[in-house]
Each structure stands twice: as structure tokens, then as C-alpha cells.
């Protein structure tokens, strides 16, 4: 099954702190916590994660250190 982005969760990258906090609240409501089997048809086929650091002036983003 291909992965697809949800258009209703799209947002601009440059946002205020207040807008970022509101976006985090919106995304947090989408989190589903449930146990997953380690094997079998319901086991995860893909896992991913992201760790990003931002410069204080906002001009750079990427894995730390630069």
C-alpha cells in the first residue's frame, strides 16, 4: 500500500510559535496508540523517525551537528 499525505494536515513551514503549538495539538489528536504484533499480517511493514535541529535564526535545519 503506497503512503499518501493527507491534504487536510498540510501547512506552511514558516509559522509563529502560537501557530506551531496549534499545529502540534492538531497532529497530536491524530496519534493512534495501540499494541502491534511483532509478526503476522497485522505487524508493521515500515517504521520511520526524524530528528531535526534548527539554527536560532531559522536559516538552517538538519541533523545536528552541522
Image: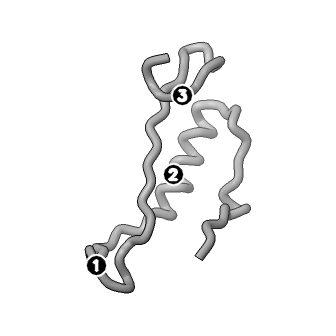
- Residue extending furthest bottom? 41
Q: Compared with residue 21, is residue 66 higher up or lower down, i.e. above or below?
A: above
Residue closest to the far top? 57
Q: Is disc 1 surrounded by few (<14), some (14 to 19) or many (20+) residues within 10 Å? A: few
Q: Earlier in the sequence, mark 1 or mark 2?
A: 2
Which secondary structure, mark 2?
helix
Q: Position of residue 25 (x, y in %)?
A: 51, 51
Picture coordinates of residue 33 (x, y %)? 35, 68
Is 22 on the left or on the right of 36, as rendered? right
Q: Name the residue at 44% across, 18% down.
A: 65
User: Residue 43 occupies which quadrant of the picture?
Assistant: bottom left
Between disc 1 and disc 2, the foreground one is 1
Residue sitting at x 44%, y 64%: 46
Could you give the CA–CA distance between mark 1 and mark 3, rounded to whole angstroms? Answer: 34 Å
Q: Is residue 25 above or below residue 33?
A: above
Mark 2 closeness class: few <14, some 14–19, many ≥20 residues within 10 Å: few
- Which corner quadrant holds the N terminus? bottom right
Mark 3, residues whose alpha carbon is within 10 Å: few (<14), some, or many (≥20)?
Answer: few
**What residue lies at 42% left-to-right and 68% top-to-bottom?**
32
Does dot 3 land on a helix, a strand or a loop?
strand
Query: Considering only vertical position in the picture, is 55 above or below 43?
Result: above
Q: Closer to the camera, 38 or 58?
A: 38
The mark found on residue 39 in the picture is 1
Q: Which residue is mark 3?
A: 62
Q: In the image, which is nearer the foreground, mark 1 or mark 3?
A: 1
Q: What is the spatial separation of the Cα atoms under label 1 and label 2, in whole angstroms?
A: 32 Å
Relative to the observer, which residue lies in front, 18 or 49?
49
Q: Earlier in the sequence, mark 1 or mark 3?
A: 1
Residue tagged 2: 25
Amino acid at each position: 500500500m503506497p503512503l499518501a499525505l493527507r491534504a487536510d494536515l498540510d501547512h506552511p513551514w514558516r509559522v509563529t510559535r502560537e501557530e506551531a503549538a496549534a499545529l502540534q495539538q492538531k497532529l497530536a489528536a491524530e496519534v493512534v496508540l495501540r499494541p502491534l504484533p511483532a509478526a503476522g499480517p497485522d505487524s508493521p511493514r515500515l517504521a520511520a523517525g526524524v530528528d531535526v535541529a534548527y539554527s536560532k535564526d531559522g536559516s538552517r535545519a538538519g541533523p545536528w551537528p552541522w
